Image: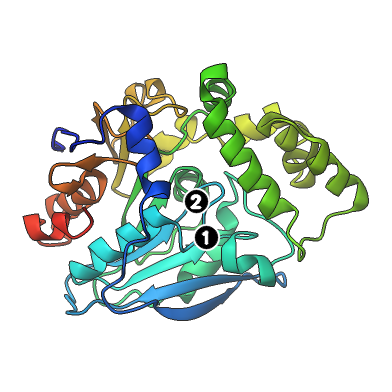
């Protein structure tokens, strides 16, 4: 399908301002309040926490939307709240899920998510109420990697009718190299602090050696090499990155899936998106938008393209301009 061209809105020009606008702005306000708390047991003692946001005016023809956050995020991240506001005003019920060790799930999980932990999605999706129109799952950044691994390797819930990712790293080794470049020090250090905060939370089941390894790590690669990879059975970081990279698994996808990304994303390279060859996958490469930004003249480009994608599939009505503007 054809996606709309991206035109940045003043004054958010360039990759860095686009990427930094989300954490700089006040959290979006949801039209029906903070949502209902939902607990999602994973079957191994850990329980994910989520919020169910109901629309002010329900559209039973719109799929229920499930949102998966990125590294260092959770159900209350600004980009997640903006997506929930957009889709609830479009008439959809929305679930905002905090993955293992993230946000409210820290208190009820002893373990953590990672870029390929697709079996958690297998465990919690069947617990959600899909409604008559099924489920539309959207993964942001590293949550997109989790989602793509689920679609390619997991037992996909038959109620899932479509999926989308935003700013997802398709080639993890390449993304790691770019993120560790000197010009990306600001982003790297921000994500390093967020990852350490999640791993070192007071409810975590770290051994003394694991805690020391995380505390001593000075880069994201060191955290993954000394803790993430061995803790989850991958060996070293290079093994973990290779195993969870979604690009070689995309031909296995059979569910209609939109991959939305910006050519000027500062630390997730766009080149792997140009190598996608998969019948069920539709790539939308915007010329701008940064990382999880996409603040354009009509609101938020990536959310509008999700609506266009659903409309193209006959799963929702075409997006209206007012629906784009509510997240501006």
Position above or below: 295 against 242: below
Quarter of the image for residue 128 reads: bottom left
Q: Residue 294, percent across and down?
A: 27, 40
Q: Residue 298, percent across and down?
A: 13, 47
| Circle number at residue 194 | none
Q: Residue 119, percent across and down?
A: 59, 57
Element type where label 2 sits in the image: helix
Instruction: Point out the image quarter for the N terminus.
Output: top left
Quarter of the image for residue 259 reads: top left
Query: Are the residues flagged by discs 1 and 2 in contact, CB closer than 8 Å?
Result: yes
The front one of 327 and 204 is: 327
| Circle number at residue 121 | 1
- Residue with the mark numbered 2: 150
Name which residue lies at 40% across and 56% down: 78
Residue 300 located left or right of residue 271: left
Quarter of the image for residue 317 reads: bottom left
- Around disc 1, counting alpha carbons within 10 Å, would you say few (fewer than 14), some (14 to 19), or many (20 or more)? many
User: How many marks can you see?
Assistant: 2
Residue 255 located left or right of residue 74: left
Position above or below: 298 against 134: above
The front one of 219 and 60 is: 219
Name which residue lies at 74% across and 64% down: 110
Q: CA distance from mark 1 to mark 2?
A: 7 Å
Can residue 136 be seen by looking at this rendering? no
Element type where label 1 sits in the image: helix
Can residue 140 be seen by looking at this rendering? yes
Position above or below: 325 against 195: below
Position above or below: 151 against 52: above
- For marks 1 and 2, the one nearer the N-term is 1
């Amino acid at each position: 399908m054809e996606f709309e061209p991206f035109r940045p809105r003043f004054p958010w020009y360039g990759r860095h301002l686009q990427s930094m606008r989300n954490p700089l702005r006040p959290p979006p306000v949801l039209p029906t309040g903070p949502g209902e708390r939902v607990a999602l047991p994973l079957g191994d003692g850990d329980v994910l926490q989520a919020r169910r946001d109901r629309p002010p005016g329900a559209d039973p023809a719109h799929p229920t939307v499930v949102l998966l956050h990125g590294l260092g995020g959770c159900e209350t991240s600004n980009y997640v709240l903006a997506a929930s506001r957009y889709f609830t005003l479009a008439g959809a019920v929305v679930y905002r899920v905090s993955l293992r060790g993230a946000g409210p799930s820290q208190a009820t999980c002893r373990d953590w998510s990672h870029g390929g932990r697709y079996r958690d999605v297998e465990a919690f999706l069947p617990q959600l109420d899909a409604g008559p129109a099924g489920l539309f799952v959207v993964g942001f950044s590293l949550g997109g990697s989790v989602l793509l691994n689920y679609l390619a390797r997991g037992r996909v819930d038959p109620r899932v009718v479509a999926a989308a990712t935003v700013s997802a790293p398709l080639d993890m080794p390449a993304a790691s190299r770019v993120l560790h470049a000197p010009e990306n020090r600001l982003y790297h250090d921000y994500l390093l602090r967020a990852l350490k905060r999640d791993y070192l939370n007071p409810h975590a089941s770290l051994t003394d050696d694991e805690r020391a390894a995380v505390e001593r790590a000075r880069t994201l690669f060191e955290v993954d090499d000394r803790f993430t990879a061995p803790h989850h059975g991958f060996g070293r970081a290079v093994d973990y990155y290779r195993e969870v990279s979604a690009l070689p698994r995309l031909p296995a996808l059979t569910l209609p899936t939109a991959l939305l990304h910006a050519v000027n994303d500062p630390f997730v390279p766009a080149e792997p998106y140009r190598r996608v060859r998969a019948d069920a996958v539709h790539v939308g490469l915007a010329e701008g938008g940064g990382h999880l930004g996409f603040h354009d003249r009509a609101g938020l480009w990536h959310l509008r393209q999700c609506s266009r994608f659903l409309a193209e599939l006959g799963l929702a009505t075409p997006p209206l301009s007012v629906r784009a503007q509510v997240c501006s």
